[in-house]
Image: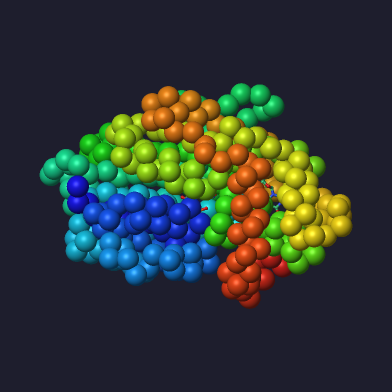
């Protein structure tokens, strides 16, 4: 079946994996990648597919209402897979309004444009909102987030994503807009900007820089290899039930400090450095304000209903990820730009 799919945020970390998967797997689909290329958007992430016939890149901002309405009128996308967002919790603490603008207003502008285009006939149309497990707030030592866990966000980032989820549902209830939402745990893998824990620490180990562990390091996250997220998005897009939510997670909880130690061991081996040398870089620093203690996803629903499960173990995924960063030094050098250096100085020094 022919389709035109607008993927927002396709030049970012997860978006680039989703765009590549769809462009390669579905030659009948026209894939439009809409991205404003913030510091986190990088067309180098998509060099291998940029000449494909079913792929188009459009530079544009989802908060620019006139531009978005015009784009929808011209391109008439049957579906939207919406990933564009400000995505880093620490940046949301220093600049919360930027998160409200892109994540809430930007999502509403897309919803509105989609509604204006198709509300006379919603047949075969879908708005897929890619969201996060952070909307559920924090867990204590036990328990898991399910699709019915109450929203309880704690950071400006997670509050903005929770708000955008609510608007997607509200458009479904009010205008019958067909939607699905997925809430995923922490992703890791290639092309992730080195501000997030795993690529930041790989980058710092390569450069013999301190590894800034927030607080006591006893915070827990549930890690998922990014390709497994992209595969889940493909499944939900094609087989998910409209108006449903799906939680996606790795069944893979790690305390930050244990993960960092594992990463240090693997880096020592791969860089042929003396065992224990990377661990010496661990430095405990001031905690993140409002730091959520623990995230963990119950992914039973997507597993039982859509047959999805992670395909890669954490050891394998982490090893592949480290290899990718070591083999793609030029990519890393390019993103270690002066703008990023300024952010790093403000955040850590
Ligand atoms: P990212 O920060 O790597 O990429 C975001 C992309 O959105 C970038 O390419 C950026 O240029 C683009 N963008 C930002 N503002 C824009 C705007 N106003 N207009 C157009 N484009 C804009 O993010 P990511 O980690 O790939 O996350 C993608 C999505 O998945 C986000 O919605 C995020 O909330 C969600 N998510 C991320 C994770 C994770 O672990 N990274 C987990 C669950 C859900
Ligand atoms: O759970 C899904 C979310 O995962 C996504 O929605 C977000 O977009 C994504 O950024 C991620 O959020 P986290 O805040 O969990 O990821 P981050 O990599 O920033 O941090 C992971 C953990 O590591 C967290 O407990 C904070 C800690 N940390 C992070 C950084 C950057 C440190 O100890 N030191 C650091 O320098």
The quarter of the displayed image where residue 220 is located: top right
Residue in the image at 39% along x and 64% along y? 49
- In this view, which residue lies farthest toward the left? 120
Q: Is residue 84 visible?
A: no
Q: Tell me: 334 left or right of 106.
A: right
The answer to whether 130 is drawn above or below residue 150 in the figure is below
> In this rendering, does residue 75 appear at all?
yes
- State the image coordinates of residue 45 (x, y, percent, origin top left): 48, 64
Residue 276: % across, % down: 86, 52
The quadrant where residue 91 appears: bottom right
Please tell me which residue is depicted at 76% across the width and 61% down the height of the picture. 271
Q: Which quadrant, please, contains the C terminus?
A: bottom right
Q: Residue at x 45, y 54 (%)?
A: 17
Q: Is residue 275 above or below residue 209?
A: above
- The one of 329 and 158 positioned closer to us in this rendering: 329
236 relative to 199 in the view: left or right: left
Q: Tell me, what colour scheme is on the image?
A: rainbow
On the picture, is 296 further left or further right than 111? right
Q: Nearer the viewer, residue 328 or 11?
A: 328
Please provide percent x and percent y for residue 127. Answer: 30, 45
Task: Where is residue 137? Give x, y as percent.
Answer: 57, 35
**37 up-or-down from 120: above or below:** below
Depth check: give the residue in front, 252 or 193.
252
Looking at the image, residue 318 sits to the left or right of residue 175; the answer is: right
Q: Residue at x 50, y 29 (%)?
A: 299
Please, which residue is most extreme toward the bottom here?
338
């Amino acid at each position: 079946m022919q389709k035109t799919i607008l993927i927002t945020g396709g030049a970012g970390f997860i978006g680039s994996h989703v765009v590549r998967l769809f462009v390669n797997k579905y030659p009948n689909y026209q894939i439009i990648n809409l991205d404003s290329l913030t510091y986190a958007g990088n067309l180098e992430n998509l060099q291998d597919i940029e000449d494909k016939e079913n792929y188009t890149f459009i530079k544009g901002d989802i908060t620019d209402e006139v531009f978005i309405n015009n784009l929808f009128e011209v391109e008439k996308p049957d579906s939207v897979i919406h990933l564009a967002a400000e995505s880093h919790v620490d940046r949301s603490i220093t600049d919360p309004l930027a998160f409200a603008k892109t994540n809430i207003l930007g999502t509403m502008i897309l919803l509105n444009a989609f509604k204006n285009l198709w509300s006379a006939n919603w047949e075969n149309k879908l708005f897929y909102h890619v969201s996060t497990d952070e909307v559920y707030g924090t867990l204590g030592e036990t328990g898991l987030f399910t699709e019915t866990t109450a929203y309880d966000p704690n950071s400006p980032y997670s509050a903005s994503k929770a708000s955008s989820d609510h608007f997607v549902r509200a458009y479904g209830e009010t205008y019958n807009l067909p939607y699905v939402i997925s809430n995923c745990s922490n992703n890791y893998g290639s092309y992730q900007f080195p501000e997030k824990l795993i690529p930041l620490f790989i980058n710092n180990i390569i450069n013999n820089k301190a590894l800034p562990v927030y607080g006591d390091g006893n915070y827990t996250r549930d890690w998922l290899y990014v390709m497994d997220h992209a595969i889940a998005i493909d499944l939900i897009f094609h087989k998910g039930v409209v108006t449903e939510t799906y939680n996606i997670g790795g069944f893979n909880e790690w305390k930050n400090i244990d993960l960092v130690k594992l990463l240090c061991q693997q880096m020592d081996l791969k860089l042929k450095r003396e065992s224990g040398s990377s661990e010496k870089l661990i430095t405990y620093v001031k905690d993140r304000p409002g730091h959520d203690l623990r995230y963990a996803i119950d992914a039973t629903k997507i597993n039982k209903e859509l047959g999805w499960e992670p395909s890669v173990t954490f050891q394998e995924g982490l090893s592949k990820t480290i290899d990718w960063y070591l083999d793609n030094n030029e990519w890393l050098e390019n993103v270690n730009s002066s703008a990023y250096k300024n952010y790093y100085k403000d955040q850590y020094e």
